[in-house]
Amino acid sequence: FLAISPKHPLMFLAVHLSLHRVLDLDHVGKQNVPVVTGPGALKVAFKYFMRTQQVLTPEEERQWKEAHPNATRYGRVKAGTYYGVGNRSVTVAGTKGSGSRFVIRGSVEGKSKGYDKMGMKHFSQIAKRKFNESCLVHLWNLEFDPDGFNWTNW
């Protein structure tokens, strides 16, 4: 579960990172949705928010840990309040194991019917087709190529 204030830099970073990850896919049919645009993208955006995405020397790493005792660079984000870009903050509550205390899974009854009414499917219900093309080429082929020319093999 995520609650975020308007114009928060974490959300800006997460949206832009997700778009870049989708557009940078070599093969759209082989993507792992939760990693490309879901929790995986949010975690990397959080690292950018915290300015922890750069590679540090061992000495820089030691100094960083000393200066940020509550922070994490590559592992799980621990409960606490973190300050990042624009001196904005993010408060993380709970742990991976205590998530059910904050979010009641399955509490939205008829969720799948809502998907149906909107003409949508949950990503896990969509059969993966093996497109051997990038996202941009795939979008072009779907929308702008009435003759069905396959730009991947030209």
Image: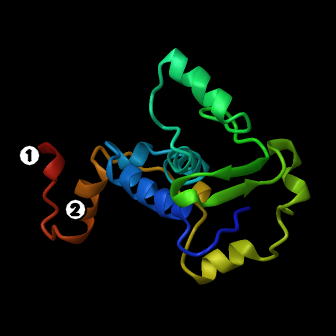
* Residue closest to the eye, 108 or 75: 75
Residue 129 sits above or below residue 110 on the image: above
Going 52% across and 55% down the picture, which residue do you hit? 85
Residue ranking furthest to the right: 101
Residue 77 sits above or below residue 66 on the image: below
Going 15% across and 71% down the picture, which residue do you hit? 146
Going 51% across and 43% down the picture, which residue do you hit? 51
- Check disc 1 and report its element: helix, strand or loop: loop
Residue that mark 1 sits on: 154
Report whether 132 appears left or right of 88. Answer: left
Q: Amino acid at mark 1?
A: Trp
| Disc 2 from disc 1: Cα separation | 13 Å
Residue ranking furthest to the top: 58
Dots 2 and 1: beta carbons under 8 Å? Answer: no
- Check disc 2 and report its element: helix, strand or loop: helix
Residue that mark 2 sits on: 141
Q: Position of residue 46 (x, y in %)?
A: 57, 49
* Residue closest to the eye, 92 or 153: 92
Q: Position of residue 153 (x, y in %)?
A: 14, 43
Q: Badge 1, how many Cα within 10 Å: few under 14, some, many 20+?
A: few
Residue ranking furthest to the bottom: 117
Q: How many marks?
A: 2
